[in-house]
Image (cartoon, helix red, strand yellow):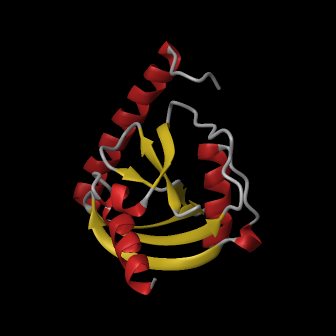
Amino acid sequence: MPAHPTAIDRGVQLGFIVAHRLLRAYWTVRRPRTQGSLVAVWNRGELLIVKNSYRREHTLPGGYRRPGETAAEAGARELAEECGIFAEPGRIRETYRGVHPFEHRKDDVTIVEVDLETRPEVIAIDHREVTWAGFKRPQEILAMNIVPHLREYIEGRDKRG
């Protein structure tokens, strides 16, 4: 993918925004429980976060689990799809699970984490679903507009040491 968004990328971003708003309208009526996995990628005390085109908050790479997929498998798949970073599911460990009312649904989220010895030289985002990705210190992230489960994960990790 190009280093900067193209006109086509901006059109696809608009599609994501419209689709997300339609989903939120559906969730407002149905109030579903959704289940997803996010992956926390750590390197030298910093955490990889992403900004999706359709959401105001920053979050971790991740998404919904496919049928029969473990949280670690979903996290590894989403990390590769969203950031071009490959991690073996066997190296990824589950560290957090929480349910939050978010966007008119009960958002059941599992966060899995992996420590990378070497920081990726390139984070290959698509400029469509993911418009930005980068490593930040936990305290920097807590000062940002982030999704509730990411805030709870970081605060809980700080307490655990």
Q: Residue at x 29, y 56 (%)?
A: 27
**Which of the image's four quarters has the N terminus?**
top right
Label count reads 0
Q: Nearer the viewer, residue 20 or 54?
A: 54
State whether residue 141 appears in this view: yes
Q: Residue at x 32, y 49 (%)?
A: 57
User: Residue 144: image x %, image y %?
Assistant: 29, 52
Q: Nearer the viewer, residue 49 or 103?
A: 49
**Apparent side of residue 90 relative to residue 156 in the rendered image (left or right):** right
Q: Residue at x 35, y 55 (%)?
A: 140
Q: Is residue 14 above or below residue 129?
A: above
Q: Residue at x 43, y 77 (%)?
A: 157
User: Residue 39: image x %, image y %?
Assistant: 56, 63
* The residue positioned farthest toward the bottom in the image shown: 160
State whether residue 67 appears in this view: no
Q: Is residue 5 above or below residue 25?
A: above
User: Residue 17: image x %, image y %?
Assistant: 36, 35
User: Residue 52: image x %, image y %?
Assistant: 43, 42
**Apparent side of residue 62 relative to residue 86 in the rendered image (left or right):** left
**Apparent side of residue 59 relative to residue 75 in the rendered image (left or right):** left
**Apparent side of residue 117 relative to residue 7 in the rendered image (left or right):** right
